[in-house]
Image (cartoon, helix red, strand yellow):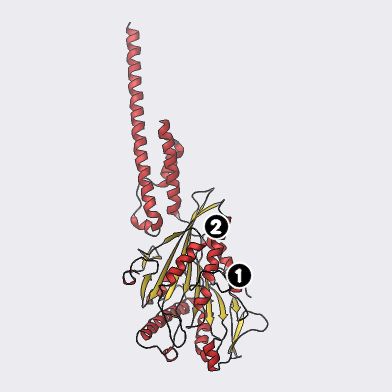
Amino acid sequence: MSSEDSSSVAVALRVRPLVQSELDRGCRIAVERSADGAPQVRVNRNESYTYNHVFDINDTQKDLFETCVRDKMKKLLHGYNVTILAYGQTGSGKTYTMGTAFNGVLDDHAGVIPRAVHDIFQAIAEMREDFRFAVTCSYVELYQEQFYDLFSSQKREKATVDIREVQNRVVMPGLTELAVNSAQEVTDHLMRGSAGRAVAATAMNETSSRSHAIFTLTLVATKLDSKQAVTTSRFNLVDLAGSERCSKTLASGDRFKEGVNINKGLLALGNVINALGSGQTAGYIPYRQSKLTRLLQDSLGGNSITLMIACVSPADYNVAETLSTLRYADRALQIKNKPVVNLDPHAAEVNMLKDIIQKLRVELLAGGKMSSSITSAVGAAGLGAIPCEESLAGSMANAAEYQRVKEQVRTLLDRNRKLQQELHQSLADLAEKEMRAHIAEQAH
């Protein structure tokens, strides 16, 4: 299997086995992996495509995870954003591969999400002597071009969220983010959220996802021997609804409308992939054609280590849809991202301010003068001016704590200055009394 460049979008192709409906139809296998073990597939024995990884019916969920996902968890834990994206026609195995339909048992059938979550918390436990981690998760569904918060306690019609762009970063104000402390908590939330997804039966898939789903883990890591070193990384796991042909799904009414919206979002995604894959990144990239592409802006052409898992059916009956997926996946290989470690300046400043508070408390109790080390720390923290709200908008998880700590520091500084003024006044009064006593002594 070929190596990956972390700045390029990596592509893994997964060819599922023939399913019962295809066997009943008498389908033959039209997509085969290269016999020499190279990461290549051939379609109808005449058209071939090469990717970073290729998995066929002989490869397990564990094989896929260990080959092309596990190494990305190490990057995530050290401050890089990571995206795993499943793409393909309806019924091609995306939800199975990603594991959004996880049943709570980490067995051979468990997909990418539960396996990744298990690895992440195992690594956090192993790193606890050097790092402190705070982990949250969120889960959104894009259905009929509307985002729904799958963790919201409100009724579905009131659980809508919108997308905003703040300082070149996409955010969702009001989205529920749940603090989690174990893999079990995460998978429990995953199962609860997935139960609320829109699914329906079509002629191509008995449990067809009628929406795109994005499950996100956010990790805030603080290096214990350097409280200024704080990173915030995001792990986006994207289970896209499958592309559809109405002539095959036999969709009508609501199912037909859903299919139109699914295809609209996937068409916009294809346009973005084509634009980025052409290498003309300095030109116009049509991210704003749909909410899906706006949400994936950072994952495609942005600051993320990204893996696309292209899922296909091997059946000759689906060869047109399979070729479409293979061509998009081939173009995605050309996309260059710019992954960097995400240092969180606001979280680091909160830690700095907490240190200043502790030092000020010690000095106030001692009744001493503010030391030069604290004076320089105060200057470094920029206490002369409160930062504007926009500068904190990109880090809303820290904004409230940041403001609270800042006010604490201001209060303590004011108390310190007042005590210093009282001390100086007392010393001046004492000096004046001593001078008068000295003059009176000389007069006698």
Q: Position of residue 124 (x, y in %)?
A: 55, 57
Q: Work out whether residue 45 or residue 311 is closer to the camera in this orientation and state it.
A: 311
Q: Position of residue 203 (x, y in %)?
A: 45, 88
In the figure, 356 relative to 65: above or below? above
* Residue at left offset 47%, top offset 65%: 188
Q: Secondary structure at mark 2?
A: helix
Judged left or right of residue 384, residue 279 is right
What is the C-alpha distance between the residues marked 2 and 1? 18 Å
Q: In the rendered image, which quarter is residue 428 located in? A: top left
The type of residue carrying mark 1 is Glu
For this orientation, the residue located farthest to the right is 36
Can the viewer see residue 80? Answer: no
In the figure, 308 relative to 173: above or below? below
In the figure, 427 relative to 38: above or below? above
Q: Position of residue 206 (x, y in %)?
A: 46, 84
| Quadrant including the C terminus | top left
Label 1 Cα neighbours within 10 Å, binned few <14 / some 14-19 / many ≥20 = few
* Residue at left offset 36%, top offset 68%: 163
Q: Which residue is mark 1?
A: 66
Q: Position of residue 253 (x, y in %)?
A: 34, 87
Can the viewer see residue 24? Answer: yes
The type of residue carrying mark 2 is Ile
For this orientation, the residue located farthest to the bottom is 26
Considering only order in the chain, which callout, 1 or 2, is on the residue closer to the N terminus? 1
| Quadrant including the N terminus | bottom right
Q: Secondary structure at mark 1?
A: helix
Q: Work out whether residue 411 or residue 138 is closer to the camera in this orientation and state it.
A: 138
Q: Work out whether residue 66 or residue 281 is closer to the camera in this orientation and state it.
A: 66
Q: Which residue is mark 2?
A: 124
